[in-house]
Image (tube, rainbow, N blue to C red):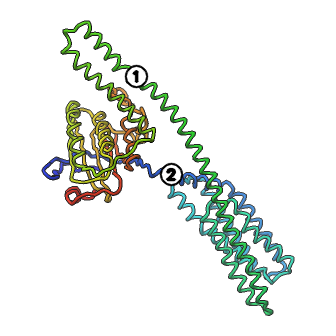
Amino acid sequence: MSLPEEPTPLVTGSHRTAALSLPLRAPSPAEVDADDEPERREIAVRADMMRNFMRATRIRQRIGAGLVLVFAAFCWRHVSPAPLLAWLLCGLGVQALRTRMESACLRRGSFTTLAAQRAFVKAMAPAYIAQGALWGASVLLFFDRIPVYDQFGCWLIVACVASAPLTSVSLVPTLLRCYTNTQFSVMMVALVFSLTARDHRQPVADHLFLLLPMAHWWLLNWLGRSIYASHKTQYTLQFDLARKEEEARAAVEVKNRFLVAATHDIRQPVTALSLYAEHLVNHPEMHLELAPKIATTTMAINRLFDSLFDLSTLQSGEQALYLQDVDLAEVLHDLHNQYEPLAKASGLELRLRAGDATVRSDPVRLRRMIGNVIGNAIKYSPPGKKILLAARLRGGRLCVEVWDQGFGIARHEIGKVFQEFYRIDRGTAPAIDGMGLGLSIVLRLAKLLNTRIAVDSVVGRGTRFTLKLADGVQADRSLNSVLGAA
């Protein structure tokens, strides 16, 4: 991911700027989205259920192999050896294949992503279908062909292999459906074939007999859904309790960090302010020299308290949105004018590239969210570098991007920079002013405004923050034609 090495002129209305050259390589994106929480919760719950399903795999394997042998023993004296041996070898072969596949999945043990869960189900489904088909076809070996007592034993085994794995296999409903539906579908076909081949037909009794496996089939599906729902509720509660416990520990950690940060960051300007005031009392003739320092220190204190107030307001969850159509170009121009003096004071060049677009949002919070990202870029960029503030269309969604040529963020720290009071350790480099609340406020505002945050960064080269604004963006033709779909 990189912009052209040579700055590319871009005209938006009467405003002409140059694109910032920032050759970033090997991007490390981090997505932050309020809508992702239910999906992450669902994936985590399903992962726990799959792991529990795999814990019982060895027991299922041994029981399955044992039942295959017991079934063959019931039929041994009454069935032709060739079809029975063929069924026995197929049954043991499918059982061995399933054992090998489940053992491989058990060794990997990774169900933490939706792709991994789908891959596991896709890999295991053929084995469960084959095993269900073999047990369903077993009816052809014994039904109406062997003595009644042996038939009764075979029916018990078939009912057992259909019902016994229900409590564990129901944790993965797709595999349960593959196994159960295949088994009973093949079984019904086999029963109909066997009944129609009889010399002495009893239509009423035959039809009543067919109702029994159909009822069993329906009962197993109903029980499977009920067991799955019960397990899902249990695992969801466990997940929620674990998250609450994690949030409680995080809250304590945030409180501790706050005390440390408040002691260090608030006491320093307050102490400086008191010293300036005391010096002014003792030396009133120095008011022209001390007054600007007092004003600067007072502004720093106000910024610290504003950040704490914003964080407290957002954490309360009681803030209301005032949505209206916002001219994004006007917002970006105002922010450019607001932060350009600060950038120049830090030896930086703040550039703007914006087209005409309208977004439905809260204008105050939108400005604060984008402004905090710009302020963060200014803080973490050395003198002589450039910062670009731009608007783009990406996949039909309006995005605000802030590019800098600053110190960059290491991959393992990208998620941490959104934590309260977290500041990147830059070793022997000068410390950055502030309490580390800017990006935390950005994250909370993004959740409030249904905005996605993407971060691409390379240490030593720079960072790009992309704010993907909420759906429902209305952009006019100038934005589409000038910026294009990135």
> How packed is label 2: few (under 14 Cα within 10 Å), some, or many (20 or more)?
some
**Residue at 31 percent of width and 26 percent of height:** 300
Residue 334 or 10: which is nearer the viewer? Answer: 334
**Residue at 22 percent of width and 50 percent of height:** 4
Residue 300 or 10: which is nearer the viewer? Answer: 300
| Residue 331 picture location, percent across and down | 24, 45
**Amino acid type of the residue that numbered disc 1 sits on in the rendered structure:** His
| Residue 147 picture location, percent across and down | 86, 80
* N-term mark: 2 or 1: 2
Residue 471 or 177: which is nearer the viewer? Answer: 471
Residue 355 or 29: which is nearer the viewer? Answer: 355
Secondary structure of the residue carrying tag 2 is helix
Q: Marks 2 and 1, Cα distance to the nearest angstrom?
A: 37 Å
User: Which residue sits furthest top?
Assistant: 282
Q: Is residue 123 visible?
A: yes
| Residue 209 picture location, percent across and down | 77, 81
90 sits to left or right of 16 = right
Q: Which residue is mark 2?
A: 40
Total number of numbered discs in the rendering: 2
| In the image, residue 72 above or below residue 254 | below
Secondary structure of the residue carrying tag 1 is helix
> How packed is label 1: few (under 14 Cα within 10 Å), some, or many (20 or more)?
few
Residue 130: image quadrant is bottom right
**Amino acid type of the residue that numbered disc 2 sits on in the rendered structure:** Arg
Q: Which residue is mark 1?
A: 264
User: Which residue sits furthest bottom?
Assistant: 199
72 sits to left or right of 110 = right
